[in-house]
Image (cartoon, grey):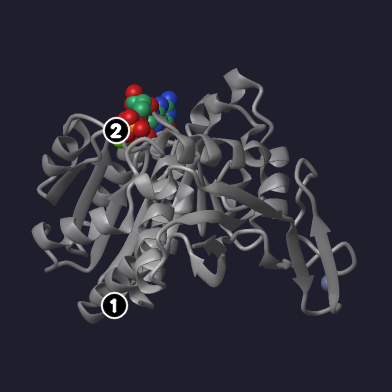
Amino acid sequence: MHEGSIAESIVDILKETKKSNNLSKITKVTLKIGIMSGVMVDALLFALDALREEEAIIKNTEFEIIESNVKAYCILCNKNFEFQKNEEIVLLCDECNMPLEIKEGKEMEIIDIEGE
Amino acid sequence: MKRVVIERKILERNDSSAQRIRALLKEKNIFSLNFMSSPGAGKTTTIEQTIKALKDKHKISFIDGDLETDRDAERIKALGIDTVQINTSGACHLDANMVLKALDKVSLDCDILIIENVGNLVCPATFDVGCDKNVVILSVPEGDDKVKKYPVMFNVADVILINKIDLADFMDFDKEKVKKEIKEISPKAKVFEISAKTGYGFDDWINFLSDMVKKR
Ligand SMILES: Nc1nc2c(ncn2[C@@H]2O[C@H](COP(=O)(O)OP(=O)(O)OP(=O)(O)O)[C@@H](O)[C@H]2O)c(=O)[nH]1
Ligand SMILES: [Mg+2]
Ligand SMILES: [Zn+2]
């Protein structure tokens, strides 16, 4: 369960952001989590919930998670591929059989926050 | 209400520590390997055999990450290798900050640094620890269906060692299926079949590794 460490890293960044923007509270946070980042969204939400008690900054914060599909690209054929959650990922081009480059789907980001 | 666009990586602190590790190891001209696998797949045994094959030619240091005990570190220390133990006390993976601290203690008068990550086929894949190459071990008794079940781990692998190949005939382990699935999820990974028990396949793996160390 590494989602605990991820949740702590999120809280650290929120603390910095709250300070640098002179906010009194953070009401909403939007995260972007790639389906191939290795983070399970449910486990992350659970870990964030578990932190609410000890971290006042997220006591009443709403978390929205945008899950991003895997997007990959064949440089040779100039062809794009997309894989959704629960779809089998094949990182080989279906035309030339060369390795695809992953463009998206591995990221873990805080996109934006709302506060007062 | 105020909206603030942040667009920051959640693991930015880990990533910057990983970059510091890379810079430090590069400056010292040290080639580094991060071994990952599920518990018991054979990380320590493979590392022991790898060290035995290389230690006449290379100076090697070792960092071991484990939830509890220093058993693996002791096994490597017995080979005369400078060793540092990280007890993650509950954390299921090593992160770059832990490794950075361990680099203060381990001898950097070496040309190869080997890290054994916590036995876990999921969590360590998410945390860059600043090594040149990720070596992922899949052992035969785990079954031939694991690559697509744990795609994130196999995708971050630069080298995949299929270990305990001596048991393949007892286990209905379809090597060709595994290699096909590795091609699909980790097309650039280099794959070796080995047995850390019998030494099968070690010549090829050691030659490949020596070559990478030479080119560092
Ligand atoms: N038959 C066979 N057994 C092996 C082989 N490699 C390792 N083993 C055995 O597998 C068991 C686990 O090996 P370790 O090297 O301790 O595995 P590990 O991945 O370091 O385990 P953790 O650090 O606990 O995650 C030991 O009993 C080894 O002797 C092999 O190639 N063939
Ligand atoms: Mg071990
Ligand atoms: Zn193509």
Q: Point out the image quarter for the C terminus of chain B.
A: bottom left
- The verdict on label 2 being within 8 Å of ligand 1 is no
Alpha carbons under labels 1 and 2: distance apart: 29 Å
Tag 1 secondary structure = helix
User: Amino acid type of disc 2?
Assistant: Gly
Name which of mark 1 and mark 2 comes first in the sequence.
1
**Residue B131 spot, x, y in % from top left:** 36, 63
Marking on residue B49 = none
- The verdict on label 1 being within 8 Å of ligand 2 is no
Whether residue B3 appears in this view of the structure is yes
| Residue that appears at 79% across and 50% down | A84
Marking on residue B90 = 2
Crowding at mark 2 (Cα within 10 Å: few <14, some 14-19, many 20+): few
Residue B53 against residue B109 in the figure, above or below: above
Q: Nearer the viewer, mark 1 or mark 2?
A: 2
Ligand 3 quadrant assignment:
bottom right
Q: Using residue A77 as the reference point, say whether residue A21 is left or right of it.
A: left
Closest to the observer: B53 or B185? B185
Q: How many marks?
A: 2
User: Amino acid type of disc 1?
Assistant: Ala
Whether residue B197 appears in this view of the structure is no
Which residue, as the protein is rendered here, is positioned at the far top?
B170
Closest to the observer: A115 or B199? A115
The answer to which image quadrant residue B142 occupies is top right
Closest to the observer: B204 or A53? A53
| Residue that appears at 56% across and 65% down | B1
**Residue A17 spot, x, y in % from top left:** 41, 67
| Residue that appears at 58% across and 59% down | B189
